[in-house]
Structure formats: structure tokens, C-alpha cells
Amino acid sequence: MSTHIAAAPGEIAPIVLFPGDPRRARWIAENFLEDAVCYSEVRGMLGFTGTWNGHHVSAQGSGMGQPSMSIYANELFDSYDVQTIVRVGSCGALTERVGMRDIIIANGACTDSGINRVRFHGQDYAPVADFGLLRAAVEAAEGMQLDSAVHVGLLFSSDQFYSTRTELTEPLVQHGALAVEMETSALYTLAAYRQRRALSICTVSDHLVTHEETTALEREQTFGEMIEIALRAATA
């Protein structure tokens, strides 16, 4: 039993879908998983386990930002022997090449966070996705009739949601970053250290160029195509 999840042994599946929003975890459980049971309500960070096409799958909220996400990822890996984590999150588009509600499968993540600088003594580490999961997600998306466009590329994991230095993202966009979110860089690093599988799949919920945005309820309950891709990839 871990400090922040407090589930009993065996209550969490080897495969975990990992939204930041705990209410999205509940929505996943109610709409995609059969016989889902809530195993944690600690600090309101909900977690559920059920089955999808015969596979045991959990949905666990991670909170916002790399520090919060890292707490839950570490406990999932260390205390519950989770083998696969797929982040299913929202992101803000940084370029007009990406549209609202497009889906981004992240092959890697840039960051402005100091977490990896501390871990690697100032050296630059390049956090990347598990290639098997990445390939499975791309193949899953290609096999589905989707309303949303799908992109494979870089995310920017920022420590600031309300940044006053938006010009600092311009070099990242010039080098291929598609969207900004707050968790993927640390997730990929922790998975690499634990020799586990991790992938981030994000839906564009806001657009930093066109200034379009979705509502909180839409972010919670209308990103189903992303969830379907994640489930197919994680159980392939």
C-alpha cells in the first residue's frame, strides 16, 4: 500500500491509463471499462480498475505538472508493479499545423523543468516513448475511422501553465514541438529508469495561436478517440 494511492496489493492492473484529471479517470472507467471498481479516493485523485476486451486495465488520475505526476508514477511502478502507463491528457497547440481536437502521439518531450537537470547533474537527457507502444498507437489510429487528425511528434512539458514568456516557445516550434502540456518529460524519464513502458497521447484542448479552447466538461468527457487509441495500443 503506497502513501498517496493506498490501494491494496492486486487492486491496480499492470496497464494504467493516466489522465491528469481524476474526473476523466472516472469517465474512462464508466464509459470504457467493464465492472470497474474504485480503488482509491485519496486526496480526490481517483483510481479505478476494470476490464477492456478481457484485459485488466486501470485508470488513475495524476494531477497537473511533473511533480504531481511523478508521485503517482513512482508509486504505480514501485508499489504496484505497473508495467505500462499511457498518459491520456490534454495539450495546447503551439502551431497552426495542429488543429483543435487533433490527437498527438508523443515520440519525445522537451522541457523547461529542472527535474531532469538535477537527476542528470546538468546533462541534457532526451526522454522518449516506448517504441513498441508508439508503434501500436500509430497502427491503432490508422485502423480507426477518426474525426480527429493524428500527429506523431514532440511535446513540450512546461512547469508553467500561465507563462509570461511565450516567446521562449518559438525555438521549440521551429525545431518541431507541436504542443505544450505539463507531464510527459518526467513520465518518459521515470519509465526508462524503471525499465517500464510509457506513452503520452494528448488531445488538443486549447490553441495558443488561434486562441480557441474547450470547456472543462469537454476536456473531461469528450476525448474518447484518444482513449480508444490508448486502450488498443496498451493491450496490443
Image: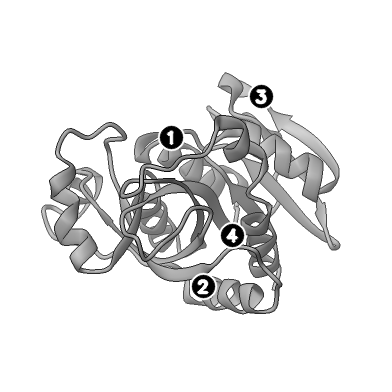
Query: Which of these two is toward me, 166 or 42?
Result: 166
For residue 66, side relative to residue 195 (left or right) = left
Image quarter for residue 1?
A: top right
Q: Nearer the viewer, mark 2 or mark 4?
A: 2
Alpha-carbon span between mark 2 and mark 1: 23 Å
Can you identify the residue that label 3 sits on?
41
Residue 192 screen position, x and y as percent = 40, 63
Q: Residues within 10 Å of mark 1 (few under 14, many from 20)?
A: some
Which comes before the other along the chain, label 2 or label 4? 4
Determine whether the residue tagged by mark 3 lies in a helix, strand or loop.
loop
Residue 96 screen position, x and y as percent = 34, 60
| Colour setup of the view | one colour
Which comes before the other along the chain, label 2 or label 3? 3
Q: Which mark is residue 83?
A: 4
Q: Nearer the viewer, mark 3 or mark 4?
A: 3
Looking at this rendering, what residue extends furthest in the left direction? 122
The amino acid at mark 3 is: Glu
Can you identify the residue that label 1 sits on?
64
Which comes before the other along the chain, label 1 or label 3? 3
178 up-or-down from 181: above or below: below
Alpha-carbon span between mark 1 and mark 3: 17 Å
Q: Nearer the viewer, mark 4 or mark 1?
A: 1
Which comes before the other along the chain, label 4 or label 1? 1
Residue 162 screen position, x and y as percent = 28, 31
Q: Nearer the viewer, mark 1 or mark 3?
A: 1
For residue 132, side relative to residue 38 (left or right) = left
The amino acid at mark 4 is: Gln
Q: Residues within 10 Å of mark 3 (few under 14, many from 20)?
A: some
Look at 73% across and 32% down and name the residue there: 39
Please say whether residue 9 is visible from this viewpoint.
no
